[in-house]
Image (tube, helix red, strand yellow):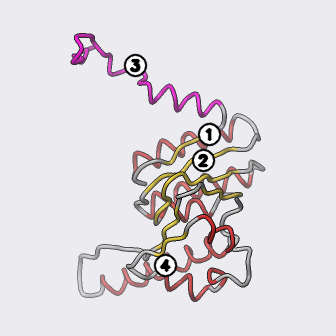
């Protein structure tokens, strides 16, 4: 096993847990997880493993702290499926937004049992983006798939809205903002008024 040299003259074993690893483990012992980066394969895999560990170790409520600019829809869908499995198992899952929950991170927050936001935190929604290559039929197939994904994302957000007079209670409005390239930002006060956030 090779030791990496430390700038302070000490040797660091790359296989030993880092301070961050130890702190995350301590948080997990209190049933707190962090979604705090780009939603991609590595982060989604780690958080899904942590979620499954929580499912196997009791039914006490779980808190997931979110500060993420979003990421890949497929990996976001993987996280949503894992969180919904927890909820089906009778475990309450609270999403707490500390900073931003943008794009796919906002959709993940909306799928939880409860959604809490801190002062200065934000949700951000915008349209699904994709990349097409292939023959002349490929762009049309990609458009149809993006429309299907948009419809499913609309239902996730719509399912959270508890104020029927809110603009977010209109599926047409939700579909518009989830197709638009321009971001729609929602602060904690508006999110609570709309019934998207609980506190």
Q: Earlier along the polypeptide chain: callout 4 or callout 3?
A: 3
The N terminus - image quarter: top left
Q: Is residue 45 above or below residue 182?
A: above
Identified at 59% across, 33% down, the residue is 27
Specify which label sits upstream in the sequence, 1 or 4. Answer: 1
Relative horizontal placement of residue 71, taking residue 191 as reference (left or right): left
Q: Is residue 59 shown left or right of residue 53?
A: right
* Separation of residues labelled 1 and 4 (CA atoms): 29 Å
The residue where tag 2 is placed is 64
Q: Mark 2 Cα within 10 Å, few/some/many (few <14, many 20+)?
A: many
Q: Which residues are magenta?
A: 1-29
Query: Which label sits on residue 32?
Result: 1
Q: Quadrant of the C terminus?
A: bottom right
First of labels 4, 2 by sequence position: 2
Front-lying residue, 53 or 108: 108
Q: Secondary structure at mark 2?
A: strand
4 and 2 marks in contact (CB < 8 Å): no
Q: Position of residue 160 (x, y in %)?
A: 68, 70
Q: Which residue is mark 3?
A: 16
Q: Position of residue 86 (x, y in %)?
A: 68, 50
Q: Residue at x 65, y 76 (%)?
A: 158
Residue at which label 4 appears: 178
**Mark carried by residue 139:** none
């Amino acid at each position: 096993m090779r030791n990496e040299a430390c700038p302070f003259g000490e040797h660091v074993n790359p296989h030993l847990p880092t301070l961050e690893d130890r702190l995350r483990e301590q948080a997990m012992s209190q049933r707190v997880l962090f979604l705090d980066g780009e939603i991609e394969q590595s982060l989604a895999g780690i958080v899904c493993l942590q979620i499954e560990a929580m499912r196997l170790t009791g039914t006490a409520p779980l808190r997931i702290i979110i500060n993420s600019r979003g990421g890949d829809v497929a990996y976001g869908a993987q996280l949503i499926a894992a969180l919904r499995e927890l909820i089906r198992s009778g475990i309450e899952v609270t999403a707490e937004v500390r900073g931003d929950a943008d794009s796919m991170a906002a959709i993940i927050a909306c799928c939880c049992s409860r959604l809490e936001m801190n002062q200065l935190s934000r949700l951000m929604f915008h349209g699904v983006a994709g990349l097409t290559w292939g023959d002349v039929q490929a762009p049309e197939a990609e458009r149809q798939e993006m429309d299907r994904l948009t419809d499913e994302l609309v239902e996730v957000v719509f399912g959270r809205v508890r104020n029927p007079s809110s603009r977010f209670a209109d599926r047409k409005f939700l579909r518009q903002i989830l197709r638009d390239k321009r971001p729609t930002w929602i602060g904690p006060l508006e999110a609570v008024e709309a019934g998207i956030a609980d506190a």
